[in-house]
Amino acid sequence: MKKFVLGLICGVGLTATTAVYASDTIQAYLFPAKFEMNGQNKEIGSEYTVLNYNGHAYVPVRFVAESLGLGIRYIDIDGVISIMNEPTNVDEVAKKVWMVQYHITNGVDGKYVKSLLGEPSVERTNDDSQQAVWRYDISPIQGYQYDDLNKIDVKGLEQGYIKAQLLVLWSNEDKVAKIELWYTDKDKHIFTYYLNQNGSTAGALYE
């Protein structure tokens, strides 16, 4: 699966600087721009690059969206870059599903995940030579218990013991490698969402 470079076109005339090739078919130029968001200076991380192509600035859309407090995700099956405000007037399940889908990407660390979702319900480190895993039990009934850290409690979802469950798998560098999320809606349908190790995503209605 190809990695997609997400760019936002800003219609600004620019002066070309260092030439680079963004693909086999276009020539672009590095543009060391500074950013201001709503009057506040915003530093762009070293993982991002700003390009000038045909007099337009191409900036990382994730950087722009998250700097403005928005969520962003790439929906592989539809080829859609989705940018969305945090939902309001929704329950805990819908809000955390949004957090997972629109904010957690490959390579983010545990501190960032905890800032979004809090402490995991259960976690396994890689001390025993198994891949480190965190599990989040979202909106479980009182007394809910489930011991397996390798698969989702589908039966628990079907029977209403829990409304959503998330597995976060970690790399040896303690960065998010991939995630598996299962969740229910108000009509008790079960949906899946996967973030794969190559950055692609997938999801479907479970039947």
Image (spheres, rainbow, N blue to C red):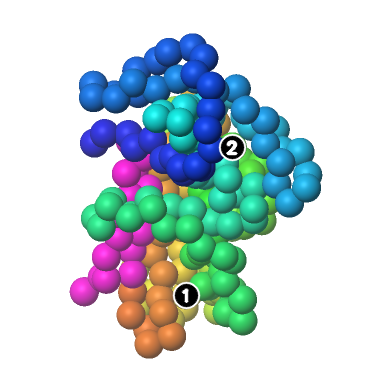
**Circle 2: is it few (<14), some (14-19), or many (20+) Cα within 10 Å?**
some
Which residue is more in the foreground, 192 or 48? 48
Mark 1 vs mark 2: give the one in front.
2
Q: Is residue 200 magenta?
A: yes
Among the 4 quarters of the image, the one containing residue 192 = bottom left
Among the 4 quarters of the image, the one containing residue 35 = top right
Which residue is more in the foreground, 25 or 202? 25
**Circle 1: is it few (<14), some (14-19), or many (20+) Cα within 10 Å?**
many
Going by the numbered disc 2, the residue's amino acid type is: Asp
Residue at 27 percent across and 52 percent down: it is 79
Q: Which residues, given as a range, are shown in magenta?
A: 191-207
Q: Is residue 61 above or below residue 96?
A: above
Of the numbered discs in the image, which one, if any, rests on residue 163? Answer: 1
Q: Secondary structure at mark 1?
A: loop
Answer whether residue 41 is visible to the viewer in this image: yes
Q: Is residue 44 above or below residue 65?
A: above
Q: Quick check: 110 left or right of 55?
A: right
Residue at 39 percent across and 64 percent down: it is 182
Q: Is residue 112 above or below residue 194?
A: above
Q: Secondary structure at mark 2?
A: loop
Q: Quick check: 187 left or right of 8?
A: left
Q: Is label 1 in contact with label 2 (beta carbons under 8 Å)?
A: no
Residue at 60 percent across and 22 percent down: it is 32
Of the numbered discs in the image, which one, if any, rests on residue 48? Answer: none
